[in-house]
Amino acid sequence: MKNQQGFTFIEVLTVLGIIALATIATLAVRDWAVGNSRVSEAKNQIITVQAGAQLWRPRNGDFTGITMTSMSQIAAVPEAWGDGAGINPWGGAINVEADLSDSSRYVVTLSGIAQDGEGARLARDFTDYSIDSTYSAGTLTLRFQG
C-alpha cells in the first residue's frame, strides 16, 4: 500500500474558492464602510457650516456677502477651510452664499461628489432640516433659513 501525501486538486480548489469569496465579501463591506464614512464626514462639515453661518450672520439676519472665506476669516468655521476648495470628503468644494431670492436664507453647495448614491443619501438626510435639499450631477445643494 502506498502512503498518500499532500492535498488533492479538488481540496486546493475548494480552499481557493473559499478565500476568493471571503475576499469579495470583505471588499464589499469595505466599500460600504468607506461610503458611510464620507457621508458622515460631509454631514459634520455641513453642520459646522450651519453653526458658522449663525456666528457670521449680522443682527439684521441678512446673509448677503457670506462665503466660506468670510466665515474662515472670523473663525466661524475652521480657518484651514479657507475658501472651501477641495475640503469635502470627495475632494470637491464647499460653497456658501446668500439665497438670491431671500437674503435671510443661505445656500450650502458641496460639489465633486463622485458617488451618486452617497449624494442622494445626503440630500434625503437633510430634507427635514433644510428648506430645500437637492442632489444632481455630483452637486448637493442645501438651502437653509437663517
Image (tube, grey):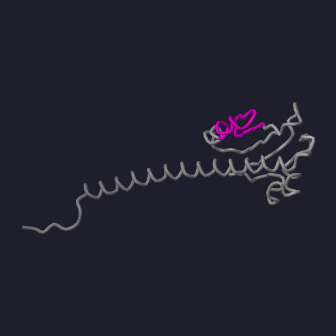
* Most foreground residue, 84 or 129: 129
Q: Quadrant of residue 13?
A: bottom left
Q: For the C terminus, give its image quadrant.
A: top right
- Point out the residue furthest to the top here: 101
Name which residue lies at 37% across and 56% down: 19
Q: Residue at x 54, y 48 (%)?
A: 32
Residue 132 lies in the magenta-colored region: yes
Q: Position of residue 99 (x, y in %)?
A: 85, 36
Q: Residue furthest left?
A: 1
Q: Residue 81 or 91: which is nearer the viewer?
A: 81
Q: Is residue 96 left or right of residue 58?
A: left
| Region in magenta | 122-143
23 to the left or right of 33: left
Query: Where is residue 6 shown, x and y percent of the image?
Result: 22, 66
Q: From the viewer's side, name the closer residue of 64 and 140.
A: 64
Quadrant in which the N terminus appears: bottom left
